Amino acid sequence: MATASTVSEAISNATPAGPGPAAPAALLVSLSPLSSDALEGMLANLALAFPDQTVDVATPDSALPALPASSQLRLTTYTPGLPAPGGWVLTAADFVNTFKLLQERKSAACLLLGPEAQSLSPEALHALAASALGGADLTLPHYLLGPRDGLVNSAILYPVTRALFATRPRYPLAIDLAVTPRMAERLATAAQKFTAAGQDAALLWPVAEAAAAGLSLAEVPAGPRSLPSPDAADLNSLLAQVAGSFFADLDAKASFWQRARLAYSPRAAVTSPAATQAVTMPNASGNPDVTGVQAMLDSFRLAYTNLHEIWSLVLPPNSLLGLKKLSLMPPASFRMPDALWARIVYDFILAYRLRTINRGHLLGALTPLYLAWVASHLLLSTGTGTEALAPEKHIEALAAAFEADKPYLVSRWRWPDRFNP
């Protein structure tokens, strides 16, 4: 974890010389809309994170609380150039607005903080700033979440991003980022493709943008964080929104991730043992916590009967055989092999690219398969047998399976007719 003197020195070195209070602050903090209480909590954490440095804090909220005369925070309100949709994740409009703010303030780095960022600790804010001011173009937080949180990320986003882009950030769709001006410009340029079409709420994939541009990546431990509720009212809509955007971005960057290389090496990685600790949830009964697993299994088995014809258009015979075996397993022993899940996700990515079936129907057909993976993950990570794994160890093993199967995706991407299901 960076110390206060580290950030102080970085800010001192990055701040342009010259007298007068109007000199640009090296660090800009761009906030999402917050309630008055949340904004006060956010400012309190920023004051603790940067007690001796001038920091520009920009918020779209018009009602600004009074700050002490001794405060080093320079709080201002701004009118977004684009209407940033208030939601659960950073969107295209957020990146365009942030880059414009950086241009105006001429800061050396920016913390772009998403909804409910007041739950981030001063230490996490400190570490993000230290990394960006130290030269990392994109810094992502490594949150400590419960075993039931962020499972779309664990099942799909993290293992696929790691396998295809050879990057290690645990949360590729993090809702808080630290960026340099050139990373902010890269993200704003990508975002303008959507905002020009009126898609201000479109998702962006910062890790993929940084990797494709050869910019440096870092990850810092961020501890626990409150996660805002997604806009989507149901899992089907949420998974379609996230996976659809993710698959489309993979399609757009295929020429990059198909190139053979050993690894993408971050120039400024910040690591800590705390970043890889798993969060365990207390269980007073001593029995595995498998709440909701039976409903997930029922949904999968029903889908196996009703969606088998659609799955057969997307998945090869071996995968279909694996699903048949899963449909017959009793709940206590239900386990989806990592290799099977990796192959399923890769085949859905390919089907999205080839438009094998209507994309809306395709993403809907992925939901019960995802629920089967979640059920398996929960049973595996809460069990007491010899096969039981800590949640984070299972996710790392899963990511390794995706890495091992990347040649399959590349081969089918280049020669799809040779690998028809």
Image (cartoon, helix red, strand yellow):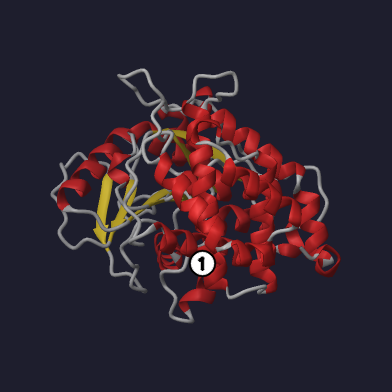
Dot 1 crowding, Cα within 10 Å, few <14, some 14–19, many 20+: many
Tell which residue pokes out farthest to the bottom in this image: 197
What residue would you read off at disc 1? Answer: 188
Residue 366 spot, x, y in % from top left: 55, 59
Relative to residue 371, is residue 264 drawn left or right? right
Residue 332 appears left or right of 231: right
Q: Give the image location of residue 3, x and y in percent.
A: 44, 26
Residue 269 place in picture, x, y as percent = 60, 36
* Residue at screen point 57% across, 46% down: 327
Res 413 seen here: yes
Name the residue located 39 percent from the left edge and 63 percent from the top edge.
101
Indicate whether 404 appears above or below 237.
above
Q: Quadrant of the C terminus?
A: bottom right
In this rendering, is residue 277 above or below 363?
A: above
Secondary element under disc 1, as helix, strand or loop, is helix
Which quarter of the picture shows residue 359?
A: bottom right
140, 405: nearer the viewer: 405
- Which amino acid, by three-letter code, is at mark 1? Ala
Can residue 162 be seen in the rendering of this structure? no
Residue sitting nearer the eye, 204 or 293: 293
On the rendered structure, is 310 left or right of 201? right
- The residue located at (33%, 67%) in the rendering is 85
